[in-house]
């Protein structure tokens, strides 16, 4: 093997490695992100650099965060001619994104390892005011939950907590064949755009508590699931039907319940 050649990489299951290979999908994601010359983009899990190729050279700065150390020399080799990019060899769940953003804002991108996608999104929400937007490839079922509307089976804790902080848009569906190796499930790309909460909660912990308690048994009525926090009269006073179920309440109603607890 020539010195500059890189040995073939075997996808590792424990790092959730499914590499994107479909050029049409890769360029559709690049177009959806459309990096601008004044931006700092952070890509989580660049892998072999499929999405990275769409981003590199287009933004002012590109930071890659990759957990698998074996991939670092491959990325360095592949993009050696390019400027204004760097790699952080780290677990994205432990990265302080406010440090990366500094005094500015970042845009976050990633074809995420599906086993850590929910904790990673919750971790990123802590930095929502320093994030301009996020584009993620996820399991389609997770994207449906992120973008769900009240009154549907997909509406739950993930939809509510994410939509408290962000607008969530379903961008495109991606079949298993677009990856190597092909995952067992369909995937989709979501755009999350942080904005001020439409109905501010006085205490975010209380909002999380009410939502978690209501959805602990989603088939039961609110009279039952919320009885440790409210009695039926209190629910009626707040304009909430005690015989309704958790999935019928809107974000505004959960915020109202949590603010009642806080007061
Ligand atoms: N972006 C590449 C693509 O689209 O082909 C790779 C996507 S692959 C689904 C997920 C990538 O995330 C892998 O490169 C994996 O090594 C990396 N990864 C897994 N866990 C990670 C973590 N906790 N922090 C950062 N990267 C991680």
Image: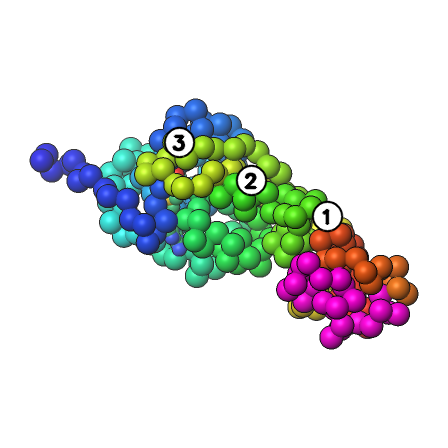
Judge by depth and name the residue closer to the eye, 39 or 223. 223
The residues tagged by marks 1 and 2 sit, at their Cα atoms, a distance apart of: 18 Å
Percent position of residue 260, x then y: 81, 68
Q: Is residue 91 magenta?
A: no
Q: Sequence order check: which comes first, mark 3 or mark 2?
A: 3
Q: Is residue 199 left or right of residue 155?
A: right
Report, in whole angstroms, how far the alpha carbon at label 3 lies from the one at label 2.
17 Å
* Residue 21 pos. (x, y %): 35, 31
Mark 3 is surrounded, within 10 Å at the Cα level, by few (under 14), some (14 to 19) or many (20 or more) other residues, namely many
Q: Is residue 126 left or right of residue 232?
A: left
Mark 3: secondary structure: helix
Q: Which mark is residue 150?
A: 1
Residue name at image x 15 percent, y 36 percent: 4
Q: Indicate which disc, 1 or 3, sits on the residue closer to the N terminus.
A: 1
| Quadrant in the picture for residue 190 | top right
| Residue displayed at 29% across by 41% down | 75
Whole-number angstrom distance, CA of label 1 to CA of label 3: 31 Å
Q: Which residue is mark 3?
A: 178
Q: What residue did someone put label 2 on?
A: 190
Q: Are marks 1 and 3 in contact (CB under 8 Å)?
A: no
Q: Residue furthest top?
A: 24
The residue lying at 34 percent from left, 45 percent from top is 17
Percent of width and height locating residue 201: 74, 62
Q: Is residue 103 visible?
A: no
Disc 2 element:
strand
Which span of residues is magenta-colored? 213-235
**Front-most of residues 125 and 18:** 18
Quadrant (top left, top right, bottom left, bottom right) of the N terminus: top left
């Amino acid at each position: 093997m020539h010195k500059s050649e890189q040995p073939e990489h075997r996808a590792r299951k424990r790092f959730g490695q499914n590499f994107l290979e479909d050029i049409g999908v890769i360029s559709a994601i690049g177009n959806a992100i459309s990096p601008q010359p004044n931006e700092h983009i952070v890509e989580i899990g660049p892998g072999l650099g499929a999405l990275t190729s769409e981003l590199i050279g287009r933004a002012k700065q590109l930071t890659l965060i990759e957990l698998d150390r074996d991939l670092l020399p491959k990325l360095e080799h592949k993009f050696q001619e390019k400027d204004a990019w760097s790699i952080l060899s780290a677990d994205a769940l432990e990265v302080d994104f406010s440090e990366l953003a500094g005094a500015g804002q970042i845009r976050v991108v990633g074809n995420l390892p599906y086993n850590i996608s929910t904790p990673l999104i919750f971790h990123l929400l802590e930095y929502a005011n320093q994030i301009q937007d996020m584009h993620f490839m996820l399991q389609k079922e997770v994207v449906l939950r992120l973008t769900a509307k009240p009154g549907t089976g997909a509406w739950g804790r993930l939809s509510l907590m994410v939509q408290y902080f962000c607008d969530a848009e379903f961008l495109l569906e991606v079949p298993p064949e677009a990856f190597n190796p092909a995952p067992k499930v369909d995937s989709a790309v979501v755009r999350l755009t942080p904005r001020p909460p439409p109905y501010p909660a006085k205490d975010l912990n209380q909002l999380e508590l009410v939502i978690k308690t209501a959805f602990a048994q989603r088939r039961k009525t609110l009279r039952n699931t919320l009885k440790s926090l409210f009695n039926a009269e209190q629910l009626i006073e707040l304009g909430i039907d005690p015989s309704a179920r958790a999935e019928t309440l809107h974000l505004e109603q959960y915020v109202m319940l949590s603010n009642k607890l806080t007061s």
